[in-house]
Amino acid sequence: GAGVSQTPSNKVTEKGKYVELRCDPISGHTALYWYRQSLGQGPEFLIYFQGTGAADDSGLPNDRFFAVRPEGSVSTLKIQRTERGDSAVYLCASSSRGSKPDTQYFGPGTRLTVL
Amino acid sequence: AQTVTQSQPEMSVQEAETVTLSCTYDTSESDYYLFWYKQPPSRQMILVIRQEAYKQQNATENRFSVNFQKAAKSFSLKISDSQLGDAAMYFCAYRSALPSGTYKYIFGTGTRLKVLA
């Protein structure tokens, strides 16, 4: 596709449930990032993939959060036993790691609401 | 650790006028990149302008320009001839240029820009 896409656009779930958020990066982009944006805040880094591997997961808040990118393209962010504090917009970005500074291109985000 | 500070939660500008959004950052690194992103209500983060720290010349993109003061660690965005479509949240972001870095962005808290007709 022309840009980064994320599905679903909105997700409402109940406390304790499991959710999956999907990111489809720009074709050919090897780097993929997940960020979390709470209300009134700037995005905060969660995890970075270079290819299929998670090169930096230092931003994941706890072990309820997990992300995969099995084929080096689409990525899924998985949240177990959701809590109300997980409510936020989850943004995905991709970039092409090359000689130029690799600008990150963002998707429209998934708004997660945990009731 | 690097930090980015945007001290103006909200700014207003009259259509066709000029406005400057402030951003300061803290880092011990010598090589890095700075960005301004725009986030309209659609939530999509759109790149406005980018500055490489090793370049002394300030970046410009049409009506958008920056005032990059490396010694002062300041990176302000100037929007000239403001248009109604410029209304959005604006985020300043820092990114390390170290070869071993993950290149994650560190964002400020944002400035909401209102454009008055």
Image: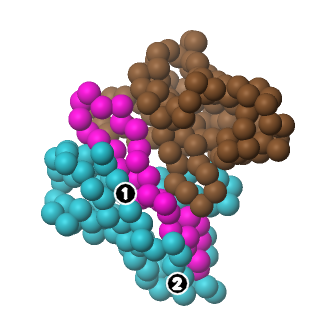
The span shown in magenta is B86-115
Disc 1 designates what residue?
A: B4
Q: Looking at this view, is B108 or A98 the one in front? A: B108
Q: Residue at x 47, y 15 (%)?
A: A53
Residue B77 visible within the image: no
Residue B22 visible within the image: yes
Q: Position of residue B93 (x, y in %)?
A: 40, 53
**The hue in which chain B appears in the rendered picture of the protein:** cyan
**Cα distance in 3D space between marks 1 and 2:** 23 Å
Q: Is residue B103 magenta?
A: yes
**The hue in which chain A appears in the rendered picture of the protein:** brown
* SS at mark 1 in the image: strand
Q: Position of residue B103 (x, y in %)?
A: 36, 36
> Taking A18 as reference, is A10 above or below it?
below
> Taking B14 as reference, is B87 above or below it?
above
Q: Position of residue A61 (x, y in %)?
A: 54, 34
| Disc 2 residue type (three-letter) | Val
Q: Chain of mark 1?
A: B
Q: Mark on residue B13?
A: 2
Instruction: For label 2, count other residues whose C-alpha is less than 10 Å away and answer few (under 14), some (14-19) or many (20+).
Output: many
* SS at mark 2 in the image: strand
Q: Is residue A42 left or right of residue B19?
A: right
Q: Place residue A58 in its image quadrant.
A: top left
Q: Residue at x 19, y 45 (%)?
A: B29
What colouring method underlies this structural image?
Answer: by chain
Q: Chain of mark 2?
A: B
